[in-house]
Amino acid sequence: MEFSCNILNSLQNKSILITGSTGFLAKIFVEKVLRVQPNVKKLYLLIRATDSNLAKQRLHDEVLGKDLFRVLREKYGEDFESFISNKVTPLPGDVMYANMGVKNSEMLQELLNEITIIVNVAGNTKFDERYDVALDVNTFGSMNVLNFAKNCIKLEMLLHVSTAYVCGEKSGLILEKPIRMGETPNGSLDLDILQEQSIAQNKLKELETLQATKDEERSAMKELGIKRASLYGWRNTYVFTKAMAEMMIWHSRGYLPLVIVRPSVVTSTYKEPFPGWIEGTRHIDTCAVAYGTGKVTCFLGNPNFALDVIPGDMVVNAMIVAMVTHANQSSEHIYHVGSSSKNPCTPNKFADYGYHYFLINPVISKGGKPVIVTKPTMLTSLDSFGIQSGKYVMLLQLFSPNL
């Protein structure tokens, strides 16, 4: 996507703080801004680290060292390192703490005086994370970012990245509207976020009294998260704690310029900086890898459902346009970023795309031979779900309308 001059100019001389900066989406955001607007003043990247040296190391290993930055490296050549040194500052910190864990008083004052935009991409995306951890990072971590933003004297925008699935298991057209404090998918009226925090803390104390092992504690806290999410109509701990984060920051924002972006299932890049960049296997990518390596030949899914996936670079483009468009506006704005309404991808389409791709681009096995795929079988009911030709069928939860 080519940005207009107005959007590019709006990024000029901005000081932008990015949380969750070693994550997949944040890296695409950082690369995009540096590539399209080299006159951005400074990007401050919050990185979980105990000191500045470790933060710098993680920046080089987990961000700049990725192939994602290939185009930018080629553009600047020998000047790449000096360009990055002038434009990017790694910050040791953690959203779980006040002031986002920034301990250096001089740096803290610099941030409060200079930051114009905060992009909060920090989050624990494990569906079944420990409840206490998910609350600390996703819910109360977002509040720490909001409180920090309120103290930034030049702040023009706080952009918070959430997920489309905070809406629960609703079907049909989902409107871009805020989740009110205590609002739940199943209509329960007794959700109290501070009480949820107390429930998690009390469970930890109970486990400590019982002298539970680390594994027992981890298992119990994961189970608690799923149980509490299900109680109110959310499918997993991740979307539940992200929904509570939205409630809190929306309720507490005051007149702060705030945009919430809710992407659906984020996949590899479509076009920028080049097609197909992905990090690891994420969600639906796991299915593609399993099929391409010959481990799966069948999929279970409703052929009429839309598999809502969206390339990472499209999400970042939406983020940038939204934060520029609504800078210095005190009114609230929410954007869903998905594909199901305009360009729905059905399970049948997904299977066909995979088949034709791996026919032309087969995976090479450890033995050096190409893996020959056959056209996958689509199973449309649980009755047909089972073991086919000696290979396990993969159940794709992503083929249901919600996560």
Image: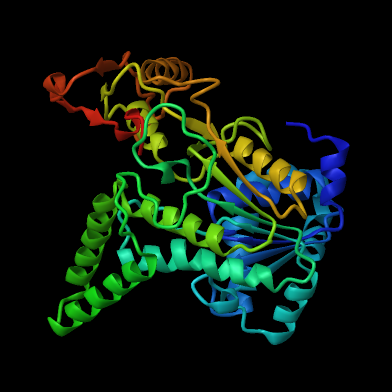
In the picture shown, does residue 241 fall above or below 402?
below
Give the residue displayed 36% in from the left and 42% down from the top. 168
In percent of width and height, residue 49 lies at 54, 74
Whether residue 31 can be seen here: yes
Name the quadrant containing residue 99. bottom right
In percent of width and height, residue 332 lies at 64, 50
Left-right relation of 318 to 190: right
Colouring:
rainbow
In percent of width and height, residue 245 lies at 47, 59
In the picture shown, does residue 95 fall above or below 239?
below
Give the residue displayed 71% in from the left and 48% down from the top. 323
In the picture shown, does residue 52 fall above or below 10?
below
Name the quadrant containing residue 328. bottom right
In percent of width and height, residue 266 lies at 50, 39
Left-right relation of 321 to 307: right
Left-right relation of 42 to 331: right
Whether residue 365 can be seen here: no
Q: In this view of the protein, which residue sits in the foreground, 325 or 297?
A: 325
Q: In this view of the protein, which residue sits in the foreground, 21 or 137?
A: 137
For the N terminus, which image quadrant?
Answer: top right
For the C terminus, which image quadrant?
Answer: top left
Give the residue displayed 40% in from the left and 19% down from the top. 346
Q: In this view of the protein, which residue sits in the foreground, 254 or 139?
A: 254
Q: How many marks?
A: 0
